[in-house]
Image (cartoon, rainbow, N blue to C red):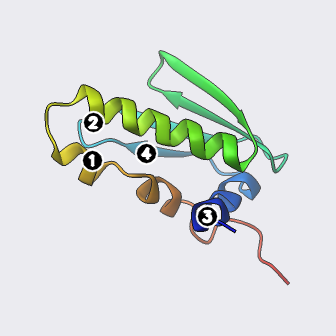
């Protein structure tokens, strides 16, 4: 199994909304619905996305990061805003395996 997808499982099983702040100060809200599949992603008040499943969440989050990096003239944005920083916010939040 892909390492990123294992980390996304923590988000899917969490019930906790978290806010990721990009290096430029813009925020991205990540809100698991609690059904183990659906996660809402909000960028500020303008953009909202609903994802179903680990693959969909991962693709959407990576697409958001890629679009933001392309819009930035500062190369350091790619170093500051990466998918592992987003996924690490939920480290230890998922259900424990028995």
Percent position of residue 93, x then y: 65, 65
Q: In which quarter of the image is the N terminus?
A: bottom right
Q: Residue 34 carries which label?
A: none
8 to 53, vertically: above or below: below
Q: Which mark is residue 7?
A: 3
Q: Can you tell which of label 4 and label 3 is closer to the viewer?
A: 3
From mark 2 to mark 4, how far is it between C-alphas?
9 Å
From mark 2 to mark 3, how far is it between C-alphas?
24 Å
Q: Residue 20 carries which label?
A: 4
The answer to which of 65 and 11 lies nearer the viewer is 65
Local packing at callout 2 (Cα closer than 10 Å; few below 14, some 14-19, many 20+) is few
Which residue is drawn at the image coordinates 70% and 60% (left, top)?
9
Q: Name the residue under label 2.
A: 25
What secondary structure is found at the residue carrying circle 4? strand
Q: Mark 1 points at which residue?
A: 78
Q: Can you tell which of label 1 and label 2 is closer to the viewer?
A: 1
Q: Quadrant of the C terminus?
A: bottom right
Local packing at callout 4 (Cα closer than 10 Å; few below 14, some 14-19, many 20+) is some
State which tag comes first along the sequence, 3 or 1. 3
Local packing at callout 1 (Cα closer than 10 Å; few below 14, some 14-19, many 20+) is some
The residue positioned farthest toward the top in the image shown: 46
Percent position of residue 90, x then y: 57, 61
């Amino acid at each position: 199994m892909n390492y990123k997808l294992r980390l996304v499982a923590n988000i899917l099983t969490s019930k906790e909304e978290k806010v990721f702040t990009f290096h430029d100060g813009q925020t991205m809200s990540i809100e698991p619905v609690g059904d183990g599949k659906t996660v809402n992603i909000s960028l500020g008040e303008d953009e909202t996305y609903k994802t179903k499943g680990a693959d969909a969440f991962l693709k959407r989050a990576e697409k958001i990061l890629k679009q933001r990096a392309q819009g930035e003239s500062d190369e350091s944005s790619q170093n500051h805003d990466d998918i592992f920083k987003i996924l690490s916010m939920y480290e230890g939040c998922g259900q424990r395996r028995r």
